[in-house]
């Protein structure tokens, strides 16, 4: 009898120890006439701040709406703190705080009344309500504007009210959809540091279409493109992964195929891909330490092709993103 009673507790403990706070399992959503997301799988560990990065229309909001049980997936599922979004939506909602893409704020309400209203909706009992509201006001640096009308606040402060609302029930997981969109640079820095602070005690997923933003705040980044997962890694590893081979930008007036073949025949050249700098641009990946620039220049001159530019390239984060997305598109075409 002892074993029978002890066993579930023990397993629960072990399970908790290794459990990812968010487990996304082949999540797929088709709208009636368009794709939302296709076959997304990833995990987020307890305490992690995960960035969800992709261009507009790539499926960030769709994914977040499924995780928050706003609508069900077409197939696949996800678990939040071990609770399945399909089978246990109430438990999932209890564990989650959600900042939607456009927060439905009531502009003619004072901040405190707005939070009180949501605390009531959340079923936070009267005795706890005031304490919780004070706590989230404090956490989001809103205490001094608690009696102001939301409509009189700056966009950055309104966004904090949205985050305060998401924190009311002290959720383990925070899902923030484009939390810094439309904010000015100063407000962006403030919201970022607020999110970083919140991430210390919680698991956070935040979406953005700006790479530098995500890498400034997040422990890991998920990159999606056209509804599909392209990469999941730390910002550092993503950078390293793509910079393993040094790259050279070549711009020259020459038939693309002949130019590509010529460059590929040069010792030390690993690959040649179209560049984003224009129709005459190519990115040449070369072996570490190979003195390729001179050989490239000589080979092109020998064929009388006009060289507009040859230079080594350091990839910016934006370029890394474009490269990852391009590699992924290429891989799927094959
Ligand atoms: N309610 C909807 N009805 C139909 N299609 C939608 C709906 N919401 C989003 N989509 C489509 O799903 C894709 C992903 O959109 P979304 O998740 O909003 O991307 P993101 O948040 O990354 O900008 C887009 O092609 C978009 O047109
Ligand atoms: Mg969106």
Image: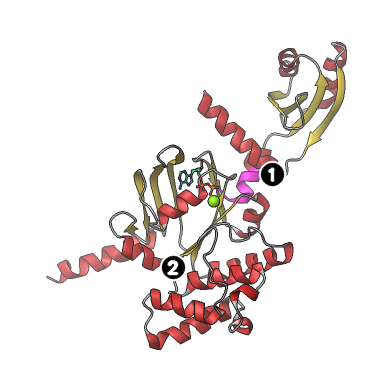
Magenta region, mostly helix, strand or loop? helix
User: Can residue 289 be seen in the rendering of this structure?
Assistant: no
User: Can residue 83 be seen in the rendering of this structure?
Assistant: yes
Element class at badge 2? loop
Residue 259 at x, y = what percent? 76, 16
Residue 114 at x, y = what percent? 50, 77
Residue position marked by numbered label 2 in the rendering: 172
State the residue in front, 260 or 175: 175
How many numbered tags mark residues here?
2
Residue position marked by numbered label 1 in the rendering: 318
Element class at badge 1? helix
Question: For the magenta stretch, what is the residue range?
Answer: 233-240
Residue 192 at x, y = what percent? 64, 64
Q: Which residue is drawn at 15% across and 71% down?
A: 2
State the residue in front, 292 or 47: 47
Residue 54 in which image quadrant: top right
Q: In this view, does 117 lie to the left or right of 142?
A: left
**Mark before the other along the chain sequence, 1 or 2:** 2
Q: Does the magenta stretch include residue 234?
A: yes
Q: Residue at x 39, y 66 (%)?
A: 95
Task: From this view, report whether residue 27 is shown above or below residue 105.
Answer: above
Q: From the image, which quarter does the N terminus lie in? A: bottom left
Q: Does the magenta stretch include residue 120?
A: no
């Amino acid at each position: 009898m002892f074993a029978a009673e002890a066993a579930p507790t023990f397993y629960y403990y072990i399970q908790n120890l290794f459990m990812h706070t968010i487990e996304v399992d082949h999540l797929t959503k088709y709208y009636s006439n368009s794709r939302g997301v296709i076959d997304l799988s990833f995990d987020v560990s307890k305490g992690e701040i995960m960035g969800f990065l992709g261009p507009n229309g790539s499926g960030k909001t769709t994914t977040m709406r499924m995780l928050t049980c706003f609508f069900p997936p077409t197939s696949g599922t996800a678990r939040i703190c071990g609770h399945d979004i399909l089978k246990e939506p109430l438990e999932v909602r209890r564990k989650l705080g959600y900042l939607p893409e456009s927060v439905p704020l009531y502009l003619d309400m004072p901040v405190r009344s707005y939070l009180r209203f949501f605390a009531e909706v959340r079923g936070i009992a009267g005795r706890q309500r005031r304490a919780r509201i004070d706590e989230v006001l404090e956490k989001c640096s809103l205490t001094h504007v608690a009696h102001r009308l939301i409509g009189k606040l700056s966009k950055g402060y309104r966004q904090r009210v949205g985050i305060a609302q998401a924190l009311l029930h002290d959720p383990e997981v925070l899902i923030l959809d484009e939390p810094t969109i439309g904010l000015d640079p100063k407000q962006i820095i403030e919201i970022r540091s607020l999110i970083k602070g919140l991430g210390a005690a919680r698991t956070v997923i935040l979406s953005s279409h700006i790479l530098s933003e995500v890498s400034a705040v997040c422990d890991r980044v998920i990159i999606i493109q056209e509804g599909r997962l392209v990469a999941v890694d730390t910002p550092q590893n993503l950078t390293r992964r793509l910079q393993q081979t040094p790259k050279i930008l070549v711009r020259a007036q020459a038939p693309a195929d002949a130019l590509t073949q010529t460059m590929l025949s040069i010792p030390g050249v690993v690959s040649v891909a179209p560049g984003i700098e224009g129709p005459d641009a190519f990115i040449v990946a070369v072996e570490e330490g190979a003195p390729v620039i001179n050989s490239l220049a000589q080979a092109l001159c020998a064929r009388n092709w006009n060289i507009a530019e040859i230079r080594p390239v350091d990839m910016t984060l934006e370029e890394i993103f474009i490269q990852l997305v391009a590699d992924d598109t290429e891989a799927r075409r094959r």
